[in-house]
Image (cartoon, rainbow, N blue to C red):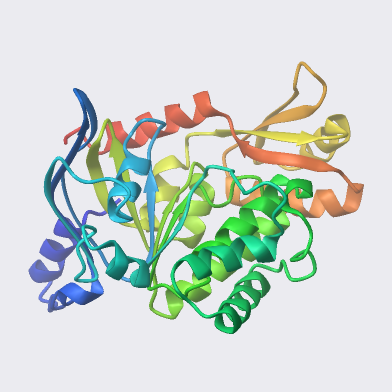
Amino acid sequence: MTTNLAAKAEAVSNGHAVLEPLPADRKIVFEGVSKFYGEVLGVNRVNLEVSPGITSLVGPNGSGKTTLMNLMAGLLRPTTGRISVLGVSPNEPELLFDHVGYCSQFDSFPRGATAREFVEFYLRVHGYSRQRTADMAHAALERVSMTEAADRKIAGFSKGMRQRVRLAQSIAHDPSVLILDEPLNGLDPMARAEIIGLFRRLADAGMHLIISSHILHEVDMMSDSVVLLHNGYIVAEGEVHGVRDEIGEHPIQILVRCDRPQALAARLFEHDHIVEARVHDDRGGLFVKTRRPDEFYLLLNTVIVEQNLAVESVGPVDDDLNAVYQYLITSEGGQH
């Protein structure tokens, strides 16, 4: 990945003009930010500027992604350093709410609430009128394709539907900054493509989207820039176009939970980018190793329809994913 600093240096050396920096009210800025939990490091000496568009935070578990997002959303205070979100300090929560929407990875809802009630309650807490609240909630649920289920109780929803409700809540007040912690968890391949399309439309309209994701193929597909974290440090930052090239020779292992893994394996083996397909020990899933995950996900959508498969979940295998992160970190020189 090309770092911002390196890209600017290359532009100057080639005789191209370097764009003027965005004004403070159009950027999210971290200046020397560190966060410690007692003696445990969350993030350390973070200097970062986030411009409009989709910025993906990637890194293994414990790398600091969620800490960075919680600092940005005002849910944590930095131990040292300064943060500005479109010119507003996270120490001003009333002002910050006008700018920021936050979608946590944690799955928790009030007992007995419907999707519509959940989103409306969130808006009423922040002072919107009842009619305005109803209109805003309906518009948000419509954007995530949840209007038909809006008056059903969330307790009966699938994981993917609950994820959509949380996303609706985060965009209901039309924020300028959307912070999304693993927003694609629990979504089937078709729903993932639909939600990624929504993210892209929001970004193209000038919004800031900060997304953490474990699925590098999707990071590559939807992002304008990537921030790679490791042990609380930013080890690389820049445009996303290099991610696929970096991992092209490193096969990725994906676990597909479905009702007929043997049938899926037989269909996948017809394609040369599939390195390995192995049925899980519990016979309820298939481990797939591929060198071209983008082609695999497209193929999987086709096979699901053709074979009428019931797919419970699709995601990378953690041990294999950590190996990919380690490869990327090593390729960046391992410098903090």
Residue 60 x, y percent position in the rendering: 40, 33
| Residue 59, quarter of picture | top left
x 44%, y 72%: residue: 203
Q: Is 117 placed above or below 176 here?
A: above
For this view, does 196 lie left or right of residue 194? left
x 65%, y 67%: residue: 144
For this view, does 264 lie left or right of residue 66? right
x 65%, y 45%: residue: 186
Residue 202 x, y percent position in the rendering: 48, 74
Residue 294 x, y percent position in the rendering: 59, 51
Q: Nearer the viewer, residue 157 or 181?
A: 157
Q: Is 87 placed above or below 31 here?
A: below
Q: Nearer the viewer, residue 116 or 311?
A: 116
x 38%, y 78%: residue: 206
| Residue 114, quarter of picture | bottom right
For this view, does 84 lie left or right of residue 68? left
Q: How many marks?
A: 0
For this view, does 60 lie left or right of residue 332? right
Residue 197 x, y percent position in the rendering: 58, 68
Q: Look at the image and tell me in which quarter the C terminus lies.
A: top left
Q: Nearer the viewer, residue 100 or 219?
A: 100
Q: Nearer the viewer, residue 111 or 152?
A: 111
Q: Is 312 placed above or below 175 here?
A: above
